[in-house]
Image: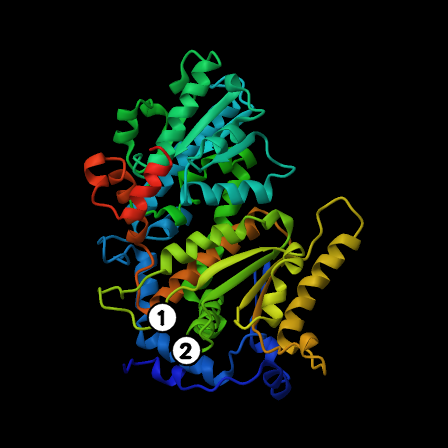
Amino acid sequence: MTEPGWDPIAGHELKRLDRLFAEDPERVPRLSLTLGGLYFDWSKTHLDEALLERFVALAEARGFDAAREALFTGGVVNPSEGRPATHVAERGSGDAEATAVAGAGHDRMRSLVDAIEAGAFGDVTGVLHIGIGGSALGPDLVIDALGRDAARYDVRVLSNIDGQAFEDAVVGLDAETTLIAAVSKTFTTTETLTNLSAALSWLGDAGVEDPFGRVIAITAAPETAIEFGVDQTRILPFGEGVGGRYSLWSTVGFSAALALGWPAFEELLEGAAEIDRHFRFAEPRANAPLMAAFADLVGTQLLRAQTRAIFAYDERLRLLPSYLQQLEMESNGKSVTADGQPLDRMSAPVTWGGVGTDAQHAVFQLLHQGKVVVPVEFVACIEQEDGLDDTHHRQLLLNAFAQGAALMTGKVSDDPARAYAGNRPSSTILLDRLDPRTLGALLAFYEHRTFANAVLLGINPFDQFGVELGKQMARAIDDPAERAKFDSSTRALIERAGL
């Protein structure tokens, strides 16, 4: 199929990475970018000057500028549901109505944080944050990354409906001094409401006289939360246009704001807003999210890579791969275009990853010598903040940099078992230090990178109907009349489990 903008890219012959370096002494400065406290290096990918020109032309053919402006001005960028995506309004961009809703939500959240700090809820030592997907992954990542030494409350994030997960989450929490933060956009999410009911029982069994008085609901459907039993004064609303995986910046970030303090949450927002301004106004060749999307598409469309791996060489970012799995795969795991036509090329690759240096002793064998090519992204922090001597951090960073070099250059050997083909792409993101501002910038970068990929592919990154089918079938399978319509294997499993 002939596609404007794609055909020149499809016909581009990729050179080996070592040859690209040999032919261009200025390759690193051409393919790297410093933005605030972040440094991006795409020089070890297969991007070259000709390919970059063709990707810029693709962006023009796809109407990238108009799509980006629609995102920032409240245009309909989610055509299947006929609405805008207003997460950037939570950071100060967007139309007047969306930013007003976001501002009101932040004001209400700050007032609640202030009230808790002032003792309006009595003595508070812990928070049980209940949500799933985007209602849990973002706050969990931020609290885990920034709250190791700074968290003022013991926050546990509960997402899994497995009863063992609930029991693990409440170990060590004092029911008398614990708040429940229940996060659900619709306030109908089965896993979240099941866990919330269990939490209310846990509070009641511990002698709390008014369990609902300990519950704060974060939702885009306040009326539904009130019907469930939550007092309207303890509901933090957010806009309908804020998608779950983009919702950290809204009142969904309440637990993070409470744990880290309001100034830290404001810094998180400002770091993200800095990336918003950059993404909106920077030219293509100096635009970090768009350049990263170009590199991503080399991987999927030219190298035919079906996966992309992220390795955080910082223990505090151990949850980043899980966070990105949802952001990227739920957004861009599509098989139709934004106007409903079949997509005739790969969309999102499978996102996976881990923590360095652990991963080096687990999965890097395949990355270096396996038969599949996996583009790799390394994320690390320059500044050491642990209390040990610099030996640990020095070795950590040297390992990260060495792995990228090894993937690119490989090694020739007369022994086939000890030969490395090289020519395997990687990129690196270096943070000056890990603080609220740089983390906010990093996460907003990934959001806009995901959006840029979607525009270039012609897909809608803001719906997620694929998530709904399994939920619908899970409800139907519990109905004996509907169960008979399921396949024989599924019915046998239900019978075997005694359900």
Hey, what amino acid is under mark 1?
Leu
Q: How many marks?
A: 2
Relative to 295, 193 lies left or right: left
| Point 46% across, 80% down: residue | 52
Q: Of callouts 1 and 2, which one flags the residue occurring earlier in the amino acid sequence?
A: 2
Residue at the far left in the pictured view = 481
Instruction: Please tell me the numbered disc located at residue 55.
Output: 2
Instruction: Please tell me the numbered disc located at residue 456.
Output: 1
| Point 56% across, 36% down: residue | 260
Relative to 348, 474 lies left or right: left
Relative to 221, 26 lies left or right: right
Q: Considering the image in quadrants, where does the C terminus appear?
A: top left
Is residue 362 visible to the viewer in this orientation of the structure?
yes
Residue 180 lies, in percent from the top left, at 44, 27
Q: Nearer the viewer, residue 2 or 127?
A: 2
**Residue neighbourhood size for the residue with mark 2, other residues' Cα within 10 Å, grouped as few (<14), some (14–19), many (≥20):** many
Residue 471 lies, in percent from the top left, at 30, 43
The quadrant holding residue 211 is: top left
Residue 141 lies, in percent from the top left, at 53, 45
Name the element at disc 1.
helix
The quadrant holding residue 337 is: bottom left
Hey, what amino acid is under mark 2?
Phe
94 lies above or below 67: above
Name the element at disc 2.
helix
Q: Are marks 1 and 2 in contact (CB under 8 Å)?
A: yes
Q: Nearer the viewer, residue 295 or 109?
A: 295
**Residue neighbourhood size for the residue with mark 1, other residues' Cα within 10 Å, grouped as few (<14), some (14–19), many (≥20):** many
C-alpha separation, residue under disc 1 versus residue under disc 2: 9 Å
